[in-house]
Image (spheres, rainbow, N blue to C red):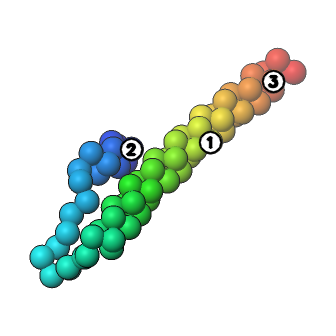
Amino acid sequence: MLLEAVVDLSRAPPHQRPRDKYNLFEWRAYCQGYYMALSKTLQVLELASQRFKLRVQTRRKATIAKRSA
């Protein structure tokens, strides 16, 4: 669910509020930062998912080892 929200944000273009007036260079930097932040957020979510899967796998292996011992 959280991953889907971030994906939705990555599809939306960066926005500029009416009170914020960026010049061309500032706007480019803002856009690059926007997409870099979304990219890093997706990477963190993917790593968290992998970590969770690894923990579940480790618990299952420990349970199986206890049963067979």
As drawn, which residue projects farthest toward the bottom?
19
Element on which disc 2 rests: helix
Mark sitting on residue 51: 1
- Give coordinates of residue 63: x percent, y percent: 73, 28
Please, is residue 6 above or below residue 23 in the view? Answer: above
Q: CA distance from mark 3 to mark 1?
A: 21 Å
Q: Quadrant of the C terminus?
A: top right
Is 2 on the left or on the right of 42, as rendered?
left
Q: Quadrant of the N terminus?
A: top left
- Give coordinates of residue 62: x percent, y percent: 76, 30
Q: CA distance from mark 3 to mark 2?
A: 34 Å
Element on which disc 3 rests: helix
Is 34 on the left or on the right of 39, as rendered?
left
Residue at label 3?
Answer: 65
31 and 17: which one is in front? 31
Q: How many marks?
A: 3
- Give coordinates of residue 21: x percent, y percent: 20, 79
As drawn, which residue projects farthest toward the top?
68
Element on which disc 1 rests: helix
Residue kind at label 3, given as amino acid type: Ala
Residue kind at label 1, given as amino acid type: Arg
| Residue plotted at (20% across, 79% down) | 20
Say if residue 63 shows up in the picture: no
51 and 36: which one is in front? 36
| Residue plotted at (66% across, 30% down) | 57
